[in-house]
Image: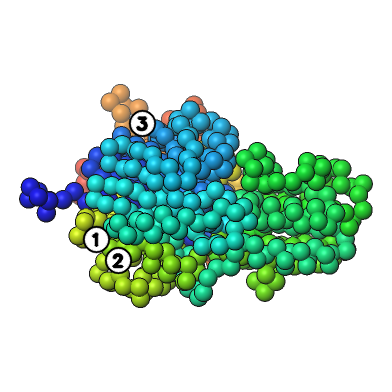
């Protein structure tokens, strides 16, 4: 209770993505009638999401409460933190977005491409800068270290106290760009009192400290020195520190660099403009120019480290790239580990490259990649510096959240002062309590290559049916007299297990069965005495009968598409006599089901 004995208004923390999963990190902070967002990322589709390019969190809650939104806080520029913003701006405005220079430079391009740049205002921040959103939120940016340059932890100053959200972090004492984690500011907040810590859990199962980004340089240096032919190197386009190391080593070993892949080109262009990537202009050459260079003088920096089907390296491995083909003697370096869910795509790409004659360098044992997320000792240091009263682990799968909570308990945070939550849960935080309140709508929204709308559950189900069991298409023409005007046209695509001629005959028999037995149920008289046919009811009943036939005939469950257009200028509808069974049963006379009743019965 507050001093005037009124219930204390809780601060609501509502994650819409990033819990029990890796990716689409999106968090809502709500106090009284104000909402701010922290990041809005995307995830990549699983194998069963056919034709889907992007997975977004369900934003129903924000659409319904758009009038409360005061702005957004961006922690850094990775896709799983900013990739969803352009899509969300098509549904609701965000008055202002604060964030680091590099992250907002990447975001600006996305907003312009999507045509929504006028629906928000982007404002860059500096380390230790404080910005106000609404009357209840004062946001302080604290420099941290991560796999991406220009990354921040944020301290939210609220009427109830300070809430620290770590963002993605590791504690790198020798960062590539020299921008060290501002541990002093964290310690200052710990001394004054942190109400709640919301912390990255991605590597909570990994003991020790996560190695510095600088640790990969000597290992990559060794690989580069041993490569005799062309070098092809793939990493995350947004891993600016890694890109910088690769460019430095290319210059050291006398190799010219061609950059392949749109996202890689964009990231390097912005990073060079802002000073996060430094190299001579002469080092970078167009792809066409390197053809005239000796193989030992060439390095191709490309996208595709996660086996994405349309990424440059994936197309090269399939022999589908217009300008680059693998030849014996090439060395391909994977300076990235597969994100959970991408492992199969990555190993398939590696296999194809090897079969083409490339020497592929990959794997954790090679020391050519380090994580951008803190391990157990990094997490302990974060907890020790901030000394939070309450604790919420985020950004990870369930087992990671549980492990992180146990780490927090080992440093003195009581178990009753922390919660393990899922997307859509509402954490209600007061000065003296933490609890899980009511859920808000949560889930996923799927976007395909059209980028014009969300792929609904029914569309996804149909795509899964098409992929797994194929499709059966039936075109049938029925006249106004309730007779088939021609033999049905049947097409089978991706379907096995039946003779087409025999199945076509069964389809015709099934349709005639419906027309003979049920036609009169769909014909009724209008006020002028002319018969009227319920073509929707006819099609529905025919479709049901054909579905039963399809399921009896085939082992799987093919998608059925029935094309049965309503005839134009059809002859007078006739009342067919109902086929009577051999054994007569008594039934009331003088009654006929109405058209609406027939629809219910069908």
CB atoms of marks 2 and 1 within 8 Å: yes
Indicate the position of residue 191 as horizontal and vertical percent values: 32, 60
Quadrant for the N terminus, please: bottom left
Which of the labelled discs sits on residue 368, or is there none? none
Give the labeled residue for mark 2. Answer: 418
Dot 2 or dot 3, earlier in sequence: 2
CB atoms of marks 2 and 3 within 8 Å: no
Q: Secondary structure at mark 3?
A: strand
- Give the residue displayed 85% in from the left and 54% down from the top: 254
Mark 3 neighbour density, 10 Å: few (under 14) some (14–19) many (20 or more)? some
Q: 249 or 513, which lies in front?
A: 249
Give the labeled residue for mark 1. Answer: 434
On the question of residue 447 being in view, the answer is no
Indicate the position of residue 422 as horizontal and vertical percent values: 36, 60
On the question of residue 100 being in view, the answer is yes
Q: CA distance from mark 2 to mark 3?
A: 70 Å
Dot 3 or dot 1, earlier in sequence: 1
Give the labeled residue for mark 3. Answer: 531
How many marks the image carries: the answer is 3
């Amino acid at each position: 209770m507050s001093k005037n004995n009124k219930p204390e208004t809780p601060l609501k923390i509502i994650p819409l993505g990033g819990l029990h999963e890796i990716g689409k990190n999106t968090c809502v902070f709500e106090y009284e009638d104000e909402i701010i967002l922290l990041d809005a990322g995307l995830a990549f589709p699983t194998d069963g999401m056919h034709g889907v390019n992007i997975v977004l969190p369900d934003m129903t809650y924000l659409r319904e409460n758009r009038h409360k939104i005061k702005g957004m806080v961006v922690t850094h520029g990775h896709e799983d933190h900013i990739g969803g913003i352009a899509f969300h701006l098509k549904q609701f405005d965000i008055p202002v977005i604060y964030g680091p220079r590099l992250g907002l430079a990447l975001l600006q391009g996305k907003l312009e491409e999507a045509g929504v740049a006028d629906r928000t205002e982007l404002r860059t921040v500096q380390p230790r800068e404080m910005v106000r959103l609404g009357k209840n939120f004062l946001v302080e940016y604290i420099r941290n270290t991560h796999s991406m340059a220009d990354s921040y932890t944020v301290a939210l100053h609220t009427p109830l106290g300070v809430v620290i959200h770590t963002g993605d972090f590791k504690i790198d004492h020798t960062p590539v760009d020299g921008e060290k984690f501002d541990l002093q500011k964290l310690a200052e907040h710990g001394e004054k009192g942190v109400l709640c810590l919301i912390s990255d859990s991605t590597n909570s199962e990994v003991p020790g400290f996560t190695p510095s980004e600088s640790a990969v340089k000597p290992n990559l240096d060794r690989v580069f020195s041993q490569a005799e032919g062309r070098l092809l190197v793939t990493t995350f386009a947004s891993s600016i520190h890694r890109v910088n190391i690769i460019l430095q080593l290319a210059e050291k070993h006398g190799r010219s660099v061609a950059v392949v892949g749109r996202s890689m080109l964009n990231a390097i262009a912005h990073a060079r403009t802002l000073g996060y990537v430094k190299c001579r202009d002469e080092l970078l050459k167009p792809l066409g120019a390197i053809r005239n260079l000796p193989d030992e003088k060439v390095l191709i920096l490309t996208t595709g480290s996660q086996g994405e089907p349309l990424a440059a390296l994936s197309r090269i491995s399939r022999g589908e790239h217009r300008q680059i083909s693998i030849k014996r003697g090439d060395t391909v370096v994977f300076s990235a580990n597969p994100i959970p869910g991408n492992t199969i795509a990555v190993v398939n790409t590696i296999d194809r490259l090897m079969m083409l004659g490339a020497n592929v360098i990959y794997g954790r044992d090679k020391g050519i990649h380090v994580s951008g997320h803190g391990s157990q000792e990094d997490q302990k240091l974060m907890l020790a510096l901030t000394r939070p009263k309450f604790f919420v682990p985020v950004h990870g799968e369930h087992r990671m959240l549980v492990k992180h909570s146990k780490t927090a308990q080992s440093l003195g945070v009581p178990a009753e002062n922390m919660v393990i939550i899922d997307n859509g849960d509402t954490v209600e935080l007061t000065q003296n309590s933490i609890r899980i309140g009511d859920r808000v709508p949560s889930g996923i929204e799927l976007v395909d290559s059209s980028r014009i709308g969300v792929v609904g559950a029914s569309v996804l189900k149909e795509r899964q049916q098409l992929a797994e069991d194929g499709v059966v298409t039936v075109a049938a023409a029925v006249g106004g007299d309730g007779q088939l005007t021609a033999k049905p046209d049947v097409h089978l695509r991706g379907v096995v297990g039946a003779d087409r001629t025999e199945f076509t005959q069964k389809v015709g028999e099934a349709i005639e069965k419906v027309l003979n037995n049920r036609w009169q149920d769909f014909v009724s008289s209008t006020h002028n005495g002319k018969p009227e046919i319920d073509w929707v009811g006819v099609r529905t009943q025919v479709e049901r009968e054909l579905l039963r036939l399809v399921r009896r005939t085939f082992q799987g469950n093919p998608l059925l598409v029935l094309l049965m257009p309503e005839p134009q200028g059809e002859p007078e509808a006739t009342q067919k006599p109902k086929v009577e069974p051999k054994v007569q049963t008594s039934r009331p006379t003088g009654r006929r089901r109405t058209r609406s009743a027939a629809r219910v019965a069908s």
